[in-house]
Image (tube, rainbow, N blue to C red):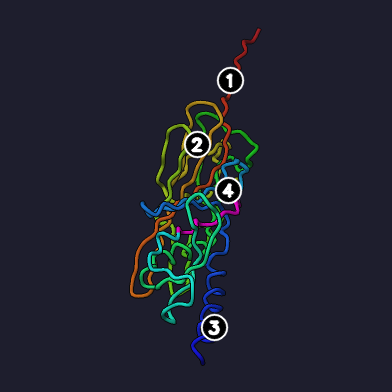
């Protein structure tokens, strides 16, 4: 194949590959390349489903960070086509050819978008999000319907990069200053009430509120993504947060004296 035609074929193949790599994630993704930590938020509207869909995508890298990138045909057949931003304040992008070995980690960051990770669905008592609980009554906490995209493991191979991700730990923030690290928890069902029709304490993950009010319960799933490719490997950490509102009232006891 003539050199010019071979370059066009390589360009088309790389463009197809990276158009799939940059598919939008299911929720807003914010990444900090200095700390190597990403965060996905569900919007925190308290709708109760914990799913969310912000429609965001990972940040496109700056062209200045791709020091060996070239805009024209790649010097070598294994170079990879990637889009980058001209400045941090502009959204316009251009395309550059970059050497794969020097940018393996950046390709791994782009691969995270293809996983389409989403926040966990928060399960808690009472089951109905419109029903209020009360001070002193145990609140059970659990991950409802964990899946590949909300709990893992999730894997992907694209653009010469293989990436495996899973939730390493889970943190519950109860809105009253309490933080719990107790994992997926135990789902509560109506059949679990005691003889007096009361909700007992969760055997694995729960909380008791001491004051009435409206609290934002947040579940933060801490993902760990191990990647490898082009003779390199590394770890990317990703926090995926889900929020649900909970109303806590007080049980009023009225004592009347007989006449």
Q: Secondary structure at mark 1?
A: loop
* One can see residue 108 in this view: yes
Give the spatial CA distance, label 2 vs label 3. Answer: 63 Å
Q: Nearer the viewer, mark 4 or mark 2?
A: 4
Look at discs 3 and 4 and give the one toward the viewer. 3
Task: Give yes or no for contact between labels 1 and 2 (Cβ–Cβ under 8 Å).
Answer: no
Among numbered discs 2 and 3, the one appearing first in the sequence: 3
Can residue 184 be seen in this snapshot?
A: no
| Residue closest to the far top | 259
Disc marking residue 9: 3
Q: Secondary structure at mark 4?
A: loop
The first of marks 4 and 2 along the sequence is 4
Residue indicated by mark 1: 253
Q: Is residue 169 magenta?
A: no
Q: Is residue 65 above or below residue 126?
A: below
Query: Mark 2 — residue?
Result: 138
Magenta stretch bounds:
52-62
Disc 3: CA contacts within 10 A as few (<14), some (14-19) or many (>=20): some
Q: Which mark is residue 48?
A: none
Circle 2: element type: loop
Label 3, label 1: how many angstroms apart (C-alpha)? 78 Å
Dot 4: few (<14), some (14–19), or many (≥20) neighbours within 10 Å?
Answer: many
């Amino acid at each position: 194949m003539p050199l010019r035609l071979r370059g066009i074929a390589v360009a088309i193949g790389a463009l197809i590959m990276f158009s799939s790599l940059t598919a939008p994630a299911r929720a807003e993704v914010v990444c900090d390349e200095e700390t190597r930590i990403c965060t996905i938020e569900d919007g925190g509207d308290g709708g109760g489903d914990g799913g969310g869909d912000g429609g965001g995508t990972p940040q496109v890298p700056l062209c200045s960070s791709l020091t060996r990138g070239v805009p024209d045909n790649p010097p070598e057949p294994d170079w990879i086509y990637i889009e980058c931003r001209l400045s941090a304040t502009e959204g316009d992008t251009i395309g550059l050819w970059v050497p794969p070995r020097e940018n393996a980690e950046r390709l791994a960051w782009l691969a995270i978008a293809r996983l389409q990770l989403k926040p966990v669905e928060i399960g808690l008592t009472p089951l109905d999000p419109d029903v209020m609980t009360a001070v002193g009554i145990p609140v059970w906490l659990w991950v409802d319907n964990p899946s590949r995209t909300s709990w893992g493991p999730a894997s992907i191979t694209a653009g010469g990069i293989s990436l495996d991700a899973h939730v390493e730990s889970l943190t519950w923030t109860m809105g009253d200053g309490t933080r719990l690290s107790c994992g997926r928890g135990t789902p509560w069902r109506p059949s679990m009430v005691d003889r007096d029709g009361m909700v007992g304490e969760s055997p694995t993950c729960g909380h008791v509120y001491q004051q009435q009010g409206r609290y934002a319960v947040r579940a933060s799933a801490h993902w760990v993504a191990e990647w490898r490719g082009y003779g390199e490997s590394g770890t990317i950490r990703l926090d995926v947060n889900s929020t649900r509102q909970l109303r806590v009232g007080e049980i009023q006891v009225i004592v009347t004296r007989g006449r």
